[in-house]
Amino acid sequence: MPPPSTPNPPPTVRATPNPTGPHATGRTDHISAGLADLLIRASRQHGGRLADYIPELAHVDPDRFGIAMTSVLGRSYRAGDENTFTIQSISKPFVYAMVIDELGLEEVARNVGFEPSGEPFNAISLEPDTGRPDNAMINAGAIVISSMVPGINTDRQVRRMRAAMSAFAGRELELDEAVLSSEAATGDRNRALGYLALAAGRLDGSVADAMEVYFQQCSLKVSVEDLAVMGATLAHGGTNPVTGDRVVSELAARHTLSMMASCGMYDYSGEWMIRVGLPAKSGVGGGIVAILPGQFGIGVHSAPLDARGNSVRGVEALTELSDYFGMHLLGHPRSPLSPIVSTRDCDGVHTVAVRGELDFVSTEQLVHHLLDHCEQAEPATVRVDLSAVTRARPIAGRLLTATGDDLRRHGWEFQLLDSACLLTPDGDNATR
Ligand code: DON
């Protein structure tokens, strides 16, 4: 990448706890206070330089530093500064999710791969034999993805892209016109990547059209709270937890998180996964979005960048945050929670009440309880009450059906109380 060159002056810390969002109350907010402490500590990092290869990006206050978290229940927490900045490369996973949702993974895979490039974001990272960009989180792949946004002309594609980005954020995102013209005026390297993709037969339409969508998606203005909500939408399986709108399918969200986990921080992605352990994406505007699937979206912003194009203080804050809140995705979860809330023996019926999500590990525990009970008792009736189960993965249905068949063969009456038909879903293979 062209080196960012404006030196970063020492920061002044403005990290004030400031709970926001739909559930804001006057109560003491220890989560935002924890975020504020993280910002103060991360502000001690004085390194980094503003990106100025897009001249307009150098006109920002390098001291501004903010962070926000939104849970999959739609609650938000924030500390630090409240400014907006351009989303830049953080747009890549969200446009990717939308295109996968529209066209499916296999169609997208014809044009863009899935492997980390280990190279800077603007490198010519194309597969030697196919000319396919290595992945969609680097410029080459993202430009191809932009060309695949559905629409009969560029105008429609841009509108579609902006509608999807706004749906992720839960509010209408606006363009920074000055950054857009600056991007377009200095975007020849990106155009060159577009021409290479076109020559390899990987680009849909013209380079100029693809660049129009790409430059506009990079020039949308967001706040850290927007990033947190956008991240929380992916964390929540594609449904915006604040608006309740489904933005992309659960499967598209999962594919996107997978790409962010392996490629989101460019040539820092491997070390990022070790130290932070959250799918993430950074942008040269100084923002980073990080996601703990099923739990939180996090947005952070501080403009000075390291040599790889990642926000110096953003990386520092998220490294601390992952540790402070215990968010590393691959941390050892200790003993799995038992799904069994109670057992009752009454009139020859052994009733097992189960709650929460029936995934593989909880179903495995339930099945063992049933088999242990039935081995030790004379055949009678065993009943599994699923009325407090929130969701059952297909594996739960398969294991419980097979176990029920076994028990019946051994003389047991096996009953499943499943009034919500959780074990016979209508084929949502995203939950497999
Ligand atoms: O393609 C570009 O040059 C920018 N508009 C986006 C690059 C970017 O954000 C890379 N991220 N760290």
Image: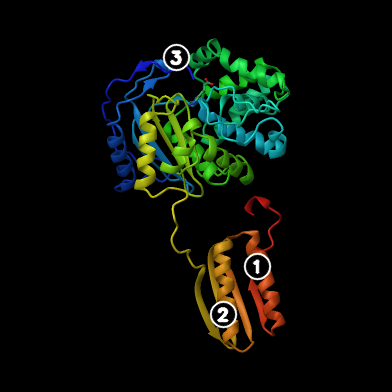
Q: Is residue 34 placed above or below 127 in the rendered structure? A: below
State the residue at coordinates (59%, 72%): 367
In this rendering, the answer to whether 107 lies above or below 374 is above
- Residue receiving disc 3: 56
Q: Name the residue under label 1.
A: 399
Label 1: few (<14), some (14–19) or many (≥20) C-alpha neighbours in 10 Å: some
- Give coordinates of residue 182: x percent, y percent: 50, 12
Q: What element carries label 2?
A: helix
Q: Is residue 288 above or below residue 70?
A: above
Q: Rounded to the nearest whole Å, what is the CA distance between mark 1 and mark 2?
A: 15 Å
C-alpha span from label 1 to label 3: 58 Å
Disc 3 secondary structure class:
helix
Residue at the (37%, 29%) spot, across then down? 312
Residue 382 at x, y percent in the picture:
61, 80
Frontmost residue, 260 versus 381? 260
Q: Name the residue under label 2.
A: 372
Which amino acid type is shown beneath numbered disc 1? Answer: Leu
Q: Could you tell me the amino acid type at mark 3?
A: Glu
